[in-house]
């Protein structure tokens, strides 16, 4: 019998520490200062994966919250990212070290290249490999990378990304990219899993939610969990933060999962701009 998944469950990466199955994102719509009061609520609700990035301007807020929380550092999984403005010679390391300073940390658990910049992807990746070897991050990965970007890294590096963080939900479900990631043991992490509230009123979603006495948002997050994705929803609503964590007491049927898998309509909230 498979082990029951809970909020405390983790997924093994192809290198580095195991990652919690659900995270709290900090790229919310609106003033970034709203994140500050929400982080203690998220931590109190049991979230242990916190996702931030230089471009979000939330690293200092996250760092302050962690320093004030009575939770061992080893129990919290922190992800941050190198923005494309730093994708040039000498700047990747500088960006990562600035992030560590912002976060008041000696290391992050996962460091990602935030967006692909084709001319510099592989070179930037090699810098991340150096930072990994130096202990400034426990794992390295990418975000918004296509199969072509991932293949270039795989062909020219000794280590493949631990994670590819992409926009991922039933209405934007890139099966070929996900299949490639699975084939190469690259974990898919889902950002904007709740589509910033759009599509949550879809009547098909409402029917499934009603049958389980759950919210549409909880159904979407559960779909992610059952696929083995790690969703990182962002909310500045305390009730929603708690509700988003209450997805481990029900299971979508195979029929429901298959139906939701068929909803893709390339409904992309944050269109990738390949460069």
Image (cartoon, rainbow, N blue to C red):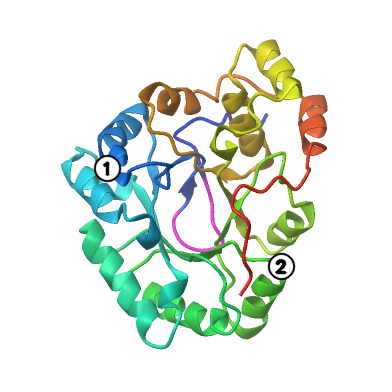
* Crowding at mark 1 (Cα within 10 Å: few <14, some 14-19, many 20+): few
Across and down, in percent, residue 50 comes to 38, 46
User: Residue at image x 74%, y 52%?
Assistant: 174
Mark on residue 57?
Answer: none
**Quadrant of the image for the C terminus?**
bottom right
Q: Tell me which segment is drawn in magenta.
A: 11-17
- SS class of the residue under badge 1? helix
Q: Mark number for residue 147? A: 2
The residue under label 1 is: 33
Residues under numbered marks 2 and 1 in contact, where contact means CB atoms less than 8 Å apart:
no
Q: Is residue 189 magenta?
A: no
Q: Position of residue 52 (x, y in %)?
A: 38, 53
Is 98 located above or below residue 37 in the figure? below
Count of residue discs: 2
Q: Earlier in the sequence, mark 2 or mark 1?
A: 1
Q: Is residue 33 left or right of residue 143?
A: left
| On screen, residue 126 above or below 54 | below
| 2 vs 1, front mark | 1
Residue 15 sits inside the magenta stretch: yes
> In terms of secondary structure, where does tag 2 sit?
helix
């Amino acid at each position: 019998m498979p082990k029951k998944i809970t909020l405390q469950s983790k997924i093994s990466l192809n290198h580095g520490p195991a990652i919690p199955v659900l995270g709290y994102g900090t790229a919310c719509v609106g003033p970034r200062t709203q994140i500050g009061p929400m982080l203690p609520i998220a931590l109190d609700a049991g979230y242990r994966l916190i996702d931030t990035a230089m471009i979000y301007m939330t690293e200092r807020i996250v760092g302050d919250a962690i320093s004030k929380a009575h939770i061992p550092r080893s129990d919290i999984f922190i992800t941050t990212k190198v923005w494309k403005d730093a994708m040039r010679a000498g700047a990747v390391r500088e960006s990562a070290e600035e992030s560590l300073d912002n976060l008041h940390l000696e290391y992050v658990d996962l460091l990602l290249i935030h967006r692909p910049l084709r001319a510099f992807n592989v070179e930037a990746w090699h810098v991340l490999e150096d930072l990994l070897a130096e202990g400034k991050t426990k794992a390295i990965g990418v975000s918004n990378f296509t199969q072509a970007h991932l293949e270039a890294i795989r062909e020219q590096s000794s280590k493949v990304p631990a994670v590819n963080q992409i926009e991922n939900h039933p209405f934007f479900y890139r099966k070929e990219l996900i299949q490639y990631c699975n084939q190469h043991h690259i974990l898919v992490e889902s950002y904007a899993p709740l589509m910033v509230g759009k599509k949550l009123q879809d009547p098909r979603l409402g029917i499934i939610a009603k049958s389980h006495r759950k919210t549409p948002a909880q159904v979407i997050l559960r779909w992610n969990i059952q696929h083995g994705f790690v969703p990182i929803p962002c909310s500045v609503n305390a009730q929603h933060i708690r509700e988003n964590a209450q997805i481990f007491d029900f299971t979508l049927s195979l029929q429901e999962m298959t139906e939701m898998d068929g909803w893709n309509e390339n409904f992309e909230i944050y269109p990738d701009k390949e460069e």
